[in-house]
Amino acid sequence: MVDTTNLIPNTPRYLKVPLIAFNTILWVLGLVLVIIGSIGVSFFSNFKDFTKVSKASAALSNLTTGAPAGVLVIGIFFVILTVIGCFVAGKEKLVGLVIYTMLMLIILVALIGVGGKALTLHNDDVVKQIGNAWEDVSNGPKNSTILKLENFLKCCYWNSTSSRNPLLCPKDSKGIPKYTDTCDSVISSKISSNLYLVGAAAVSIGVIEFICMLFALFLIIRICRAPRTKSYDYQ
């Protein structure tokens, strides 16, 4: 049999220093997720009334509320977890490293879902869902919610082929439309960049997180093999 004892560095420093370095990178990427999630939550909070009156309220709620909030929560979790990871690695806390590794595994599963969804969810699919609901609400009795969104997004009508409801499209005192952009193009430009950012950040975090888990496991093995007192893990 092959002796794997020497495959792990004898000095914990060679394991914990890279682990701390990778955790620092993860902290930055987690902060990116927090920023993107916060922007998403703030942006889509203006769609609250629109989502309520839409026929596809459940799907839109998941898209406009659930997704940004999920990204924000994962980002906050990562910011906190990476700080803890740096601490337990620096102090070589065995119990802390075990808990850290388990939490990293759990969050990795969540990241696979978020990253995969963000990368596979095409921008056109998102805009199409919003567009279908937009047209329904525009032609319904509660189209005032559309006018509010048009003022917020600074756009007029959903697209160039939409019915020109005279009650919609913000106008100045002379009755001239204030905005020339259609709402589908405005929403598309705002969503597409954030979708790719979330997907790219999630994939990057997942790869680095896996490396962190390996270093943490190696450090756990090295600590377990090293002689220590019974109170070592609780100091």
Image (spheres, rainbow, N blue to C red):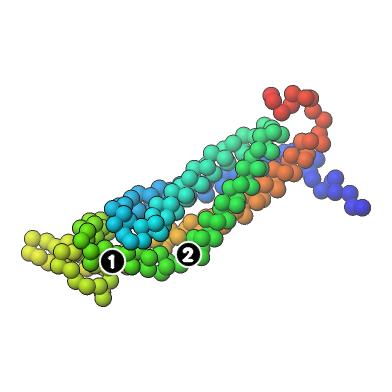
Who's the residue at 62% across and 34% down the image? 87
Graded by Cα atoms within 10 Å as few (under 14), some (14 to 19) or many (20 or more), the crowding at tag 2 reads: some
Locate residue 191 relative to residue 3 in the image: left or right: left
Locate residue 113 relative to residue 177 in the image: left or right: right
Q: Is 96 rendered above or below residue 136?
A: above
Who's the residue at 57% across and 43% down the image? 24
Locate residue 34 relative to residue 54 in the image: left or right: right
Please, what is the three-letter code of the amino acid marked with disc 2? Answer: Leu
Judged from the image, the secondary structure of the residue bearing numbered disc 2 is: loop
Please, what is the three-letter code of the amino acid marked with disc 1? Answer: Asp
Which residue in the rendered view is the most extreme toward the right?
A: 1
Q: Earlier in the sequence, mark 2 or mark 1?
A: 2
Q: Which residue is mark 1?
A: 136
The answer to whether residue 226 shows anywhere in this view is yes
Q: Is 165 rendered above or below residue 215?
A: below
Residue 31 in percent (x, y) is at 48, 46
Question: Given contact means CB atoms under 8 Å apart, are the residues at marks 2 and 1 in contact?
Answer: no
Residue 178 in percent (x, y) is at 17, 63
Who's the residue at 22% across and 59% down the image? 142
Graded by Cα atoms within 10 Å as few (under 14), some (14 to 19) or many (20 or more), the crowding at tag 1 reads: some
The answer to whether residue 25 shows anywhere in this view is no
Alpha carbons under labels 2 and 1: distance apart: 23 Å
Q: Nearer the viewer, residue 92 or 171?
A: 171
Q: Nearer the viewer, residue 112 or 131?
A: 131
The tag on residue 121 is 2
Q: Closer to us: mark 2 or mark 1?
A: 1
Residue 234 in percent (x, y) is at 69, 25
The tag on residue 120 is none
